[in-house]
Image: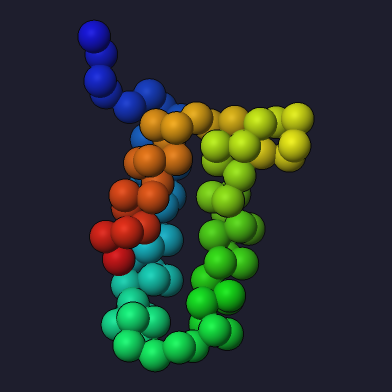
Amino acid sequence: MNLDLNEEQKLIQDTAREFAQAELAPVAASLDQQDDEDLFHENLKKLAELGFMGLNISDEYGGAEAGVVAFSAAMTEIARA
């Protein structure tokens, strides 16, 4: 059984990691400590623009159909921030 990520999954993981380090990590403490809805929504919009909101959504509904593994890899990187 091969548990390695495929190329698409690695690309999604790398993109999520780069985004999280560049955009989320610098403001993570602020988001945790304050109720800054504007900053929160700004980051959600950026995540959507990168396609993260549709990773596990069917192509029929405009998603990427990347699957649960790609979604989990991306969310793991984002959660680290």
The foreground one among 57 and 5 is 57
The foreground one among 3 and 6 is 3
Give x and y (percent) for residue 31: 39, 82
Q: Is residue 11 shown to the viewer in this render?
A: no
Q: Residue, x 39% and y 31% (percent of image)? A: 69
Q: Quadrant of residue 56?
A: top right
Q: Is residue 67 shown to the viewer in this render?
A: yes
Q: Residue, x 25% and y 20% (percent of image)? A: 3
Give x and y (percent) for residue 29: 29, 82
User: In the image, 70: left or right of 38?
Assistant: left
Give x and y (percent) for residue 50: 57, 54
Q: Look at the image and tell me in which quarter the N terminus lies.
A: top left
The foreground one among 76 and 15 is 76
Note whether 16 is above or below 56 in the view shown.
below
Note whether 80 is above or below 40 in the view shown.
above
User: In the image, 33: left or right of 7?
Assistant: left
User: In the image, 26: left or right of 1?
Assistant: right
Q: Residue furthest top?
A: 1
Q: Residue, x 50% and y 30% (percent of image)? A: 67
Q: Look at the image and tell me in which quarter the C terminus lies.
A: bottom left
Q: Quadrant of residue 2?
A: top left
